[in-house]
Image: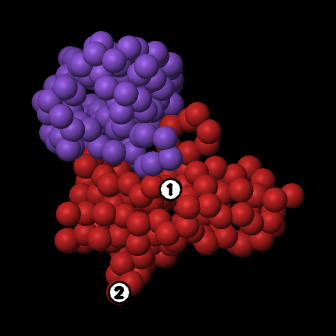
Amino acid sequence: DAGVTQSPTHLIKTRGQQVTLRCSPKSGHDTVSWYQQALGQGPQFIFQYYEKEERGRGNFPDRFSARQFPNYSSELNVNALLLGDSALYLCASSLGFSEAFFGQGTRLTVV
Amino acid sequence: AQSVTQPDIHITVSEGASLELRCNYSYGATPYLFWYVQSPGQGLQLLLKYFSGDTLVQGIKGFEAEFKRSQSSFNLRKPSVHWSDAAEYFCAVGAGSNGAGKSTFGDGTTLTVKP
C-alpha cells in the first residue's frame, strides 16, 4: 500500500500563474482533505471532499478550488498566485470517519 | 470558533528525560483532540486522539496525553525521550472523528533532543 501520494513534491511558480496539485488517497479511502501549512505555522484547513462532493471549506479565497474524481483522487487548484500562497500543501485521506493519513505534501514556492 | 494554543514554540530536553508539551484549546462542544508529529519535510503522523471516555489516552511511540476539561488542556507526555523524537509536534481540535475534517491546528512546538 503506497499510502497517500502527492505530486509534484516541489513546485516553483511566478506570481499570477495558476497551479494544480494532485493527491492520490490511501487505497480504500473515500475522503480527501487539503491543508495549507505556511512556514512556522500549523496546517490550515482548505477543503474536504467526500464522494466527489465538497463537505467543508476553510477560510480561503475563491482563487482556491478543488475537485475529487470517481477514483477518489483529488486536485487542488490555485489561480492568480500570490507570494503569500507559498507554503507546504498537505493532503489527507480517510475512510469516512476513520483515522486520517497525511501525504508528504507539495512545497509550492511563488516568486 | 475553535482555536488551539501551544504556548511553547521550542523545547529542548536531554535524551532520557521526561517530556511534556502543552496544548490549550477552545471549542464550543465536546472536542475531538489530536496530537501529530511532523519530521522535517514530511507530512503529519497521528500520535494519538481523544474523543470520549478515559481521559488518559495512549498513543504510538510511547506517547500519552491527558484530557482535562476544566483546564481546556490536552498535554502530551513521554516518560523518556529518544533522539529520534526530535521533530515538530502539533495539537489539533476538530469536529470530525477522523482527525482531518475541519480541524484547527496549533502553530506547533519544535522539540530538540540533546545527547
Residue at (25% x, 69% y) in the render: B27
Position of residue B14 in the picture relative to residue A109 (left or right): right
Quarter where residue A93 is shown: top left
Parent chain of label 2: B
Residue B25 visible at all: yes
With respect to residue B112, does B72 lie above or below? below
Residue that label 1 marks? B108
The mark nearer the N terminus, 1 or 2, is 2
Identify the image quadrant of the N terminus of chain B.
bottom left
Residue B54 visible at all: no
Counting from the top left corner in percent of width and height, residue A75 is at 28, 20
The outermost residue toward the right is B115
Give SS at disc 2: helix
Q: Nearer the viewer, residue A33 or A11?
A: A11
Residue at (17% x, 42% y) in the render: A56
Instruction: Name which residue type carries label 2.
Output: Ser
Cα separation, mark 1 vs mark 2, equals 23 Å
Quarter where residue B52 is shown: bottom left
Mark on residue B69? Answer: none
Residue that label 2 marks? B70
Q: Nearer the viewer, residue B111 or A22?
A: B111
**Who's red, chain-wise?**
B
Q: Nearer the viewer, residue B68 or B110?
A: B110
